[in-house]
Amino acid sequence: MVCLFSVWGLTTAGDEPAALQDAVEIVLEEPATTVEEALARRDTDAAEIQRVYDDQMSVINQKTVQALDLIARRAVAAGEIGVASEAWEAVLQVEPENATAKNFFVAIGQWDAMERKLARANREPEASPRKRTLQRVEFRCEDGRVFKNSQWNVE
């Protein structure tokens, strides 16, 4: 069961007549009553969050590729092949099928080496310290009992 409430109000400013404020809708959702329902809600929420994340990352990646493309083109025009190579390599890390970046490396005779480097980078995780996250969970019962649990998650 879902309960809907609308909140609205009237405001006045000096001698001006009252104006209706925009209505704000508050949605209260009943808590899940079964484990299956709770997990189904979680899956639905997680899928929506993942969709929004993927959409936003697509926009960010597109902007990044555009910026790197501009840097690379300016570097080529200035004769700075090293800078251009660095920028085009970064493009390929974000967008592995980018034809312009690939054509650049083919044109300078470095596509085979770049292809091997990208394949190696995809196989080998970066040698960085492992990320540790402390997760704390607390359950409060209606009768006042509290259950606490803490654990370290290592990624």
Image (cartoon, grey):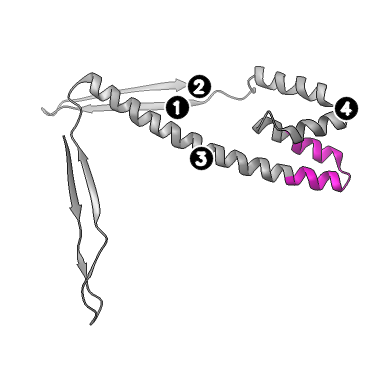
Which residue lies at the image location 20% right of the left edge and 67% below the top edge? 10
N-terminal-most mark, 4 or 1: 4
Task: Say the numbered circle drawn on residue 109.
Answer: 4
Residue position marked by numbered label 2 in the rendering: 155
The mark nearer the N terminus, 3 or 4, is: 3
Is any part of residue 46 visible from this angle? yes
Position of 144 with respect to 83 (left or right) is left
Q: Secondary structure at mark 2?
A: loop
Residue 142 disc label: none
The amino acid type, in three-letter code, at marker 4 is Gly
Pointer 3 with pointer 1, Cβ within 8 A: no
Q: Determine the secondary structure under disc 3.
A: helix
- Classify residue 154 as left or right of residue 143: right
**Mark 3 to mark 1: distance in Å?**
25 Å
Task: Kindly identify which residue carries mark 3.
Answer: 56
Q: Amino acid at mark 3?
A: Gln
